Image (spheres, rainbow, N blue to C red):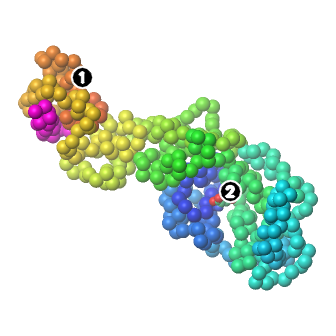
């Protein structure tokens, strides 16, 4: 039998990293087993579901490369089918109408709480054989005795006694189905073999299993994935910084870095840290998912991102950089070839946003310097050094790194100063921020004309501030 997994987000907000990891595990398992991965949008909560969230989910999945074989299917298109199944349960005596008022249920709840009992429906209408009316809901007749046993791929065996459960509502009085009913019907209809989802759903699973059994449906295998915590041990939320997948894109993360980070969060293979997509698929197994919650570590994600940027094909990286550069408000029109630039600059940055700023000076002039750097590097004593460099560079026709380097060396020797006294002010003069790979390669990329202009500008600046 072919494996079929699904990701079933509710479109009530952006796709956050917890959801993305659940999707990743479902996707990985399907890919590993040569099965199918299905996307189902659980949009029955019409008040909280938005088209914007649906789009954010689709966009995030595309960006991460989580391709689905079927879907997206929308639960709001399935209301007739849910009605049909509810009717089937009513006909078989596995469901019943209930007209308990809100007040009665409230009082029941309060009395149970006062007795330190778990609030649950007391089955008041279970045997009343009520007919449908405007004020009735439909409840599932949960078995009264016995255990529900879940052989969870992650948690191991979980046993829940039916006495812990109650007769849950499967259809509201307005005729709409509830979450546990729609999930059951869809998992059944879609022939889902493995339900991989967050462990915040573990308490729904015995209820869903009971409904599936009443329908004589085959049970899927369950895998409940532990949740993600922030570095303070609390459940990951906005407080911990970016949590939406698309925010990571905006912040300059590569999808492969985020995927690699997420797969290692609560799954491991020896002490290996770097996994290509192919390796993940080959090595992943749901039974190896950790049972305990895992803490999100932004430093590690940055480290992985740096790794992937460094190793990215510069042509592909150049493509990806186009949007970041556009958003940063400069153009590539009057500067060096981007691929050539990235080959040199991709070595040393954490994010694409940082990279975009690192290379800005090659394409855009500036009239301010990093204040701290300027204070340190631009002193009166620096003037003769920069003036000498300018003079030598203006006479240099062969504008290549080696010759550019030779000029720095000559200056060090002639003026009898340390290398840093030449290299650092030069670097600050041409970049404005003082951060660049080796200076000769940097100047070669920047070009002779701009180098001379920037040296002139720095000389003027130093003269002005030392007046
Ligand atoms: N729609 C549910 C959610 O977003 C998930 C349901 C499930 O995976 O069974 O939390």
> Which residue lies most toward the front here?
114
Q: Write the residue at 12% across / 17% down.
A: 414
Q: Is mark 2 within 8 Å of ligand 1?
A: no
Left or right of residue 49: residue 417? left
Q: Where is residue 257 in the image (x, y as percent from the top left)?
A: 49, 43
Foreground: disc 1 or disc 2: 1
Q: Distance between the residues labelled 1 and 2?
A: 62 Å
Q: Position of residue 163 (x, y in %)?
A: 88, 58
> Quadrant of the image for the N terminus?
bottom right
Residue 282 shows in the view:
no
Residue pointed to by mark 1: 420
Q: Which of 151 and 373 is in front in this view?
A: 373
Indicate the quadrant where residue 86 lies: bottom right
Within-10-Å neighbours for mark 1: few <14, some 14–19, many 20+: few
| First to last magenta residue range | 442-467
> Above or below — where is 85 with respect to 382?
below
Q: Write the residue at 91% across / 74% down.
A: 127
Disc 1 is placed on an element classified as helix
Residue pointed to by mark 2: 4
Within-10-Å neighbours for mark 2: few <14, some 14–19, many 20+: many
């Amino acid at each position: 039998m072919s494996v079929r997994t699904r990701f079933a987000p509710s479109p009530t907000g952006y796709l956050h990293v917890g959801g993305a990891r659940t999707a990743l595990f479902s996707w990985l398992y399907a890919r590993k087993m040569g099965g199918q991965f299905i996307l189902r949008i659980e949009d029955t909560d019409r008040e909280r579901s938005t088209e914007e969230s649906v789009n954010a989910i689709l966009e995030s999945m595309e960006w991460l490369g989580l391709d689905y074989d079927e879907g997206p299917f929308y639960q709001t298109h399935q209301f007739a089918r849910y009605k049909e199944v509810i009717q089937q349960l009513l006909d078989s005596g596995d469901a019943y109408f209930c007209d308990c008022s809100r007040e009665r249920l409230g009082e029941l709840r309060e009395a149970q709480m006062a007795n330190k009992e778990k609030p649950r429906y007391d089955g008041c209408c279970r045997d009343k054989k009520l007919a449908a009316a405007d004020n009735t809901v439909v409840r599932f007749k949960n078995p009264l005795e016995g255990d529900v046993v879940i052989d969870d791929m992650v948690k191991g065996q979980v046993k829940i006694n039916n006495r812990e459960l109650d007769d849950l509502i499967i259809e509201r009085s307005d005729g709409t189905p509830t979450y546990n009913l729609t999930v059951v019907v869809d998992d059944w209809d879609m022939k889902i073999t493995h339900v991989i989802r967050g462990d915040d759903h573990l308490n729904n699973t015995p209820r869903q299993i009971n409904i599936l059994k009443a329908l004589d449906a085959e049970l899927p295998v369950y895998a409940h994935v532990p949740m993600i915590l922030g570095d303070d041990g609390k459940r990951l939320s906005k407080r911990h910084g970016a949590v939406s997948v698309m925010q990571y894109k905006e912040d300059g993360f590569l999808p492969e870095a985020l995927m690699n980070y997420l797969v290692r969060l609560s799954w491991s293979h020896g002490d290996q840290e770097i996994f290509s997509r192919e390796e993940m698929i080959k090595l992943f197994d749901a039974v190896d998912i950790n049972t305990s919650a895992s803490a999100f570590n932004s430093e590690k994600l940055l480290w992985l991102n740096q790794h992937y940027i460094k190793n990215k094909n510069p042509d592909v990286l150049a493509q990806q950089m186009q949007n970041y550069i556009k958003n940063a408000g400069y153009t590539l029109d009057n500067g060096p070839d981007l691929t050539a630039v990235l080959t040199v600059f991709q070595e040393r940055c954490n994010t694409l946003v940082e990279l975009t700023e690192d290379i800005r000076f090659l394409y855009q002039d500036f009239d301010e310097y990093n204040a701290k750097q300027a204070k340190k590097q631009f002193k009166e004593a620096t003037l003769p050094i920069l003036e000498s460099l300018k003079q030598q560079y203006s006479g240099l026709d062969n504008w290549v790194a080696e010759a550019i380097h030779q000029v720095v060396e000559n200056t060090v020797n002639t003026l009898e100063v340390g290398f840093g006294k030449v290299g650092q002010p030069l670097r600050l003069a041409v970049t404005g921020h003082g951060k660049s790979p080796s200076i000769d390669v940097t100047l070669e990329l920047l070009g002779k004309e701009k180098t001379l202009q920037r040296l002139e500008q720095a000389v003027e600046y130093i003269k002005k501030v030392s007046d």
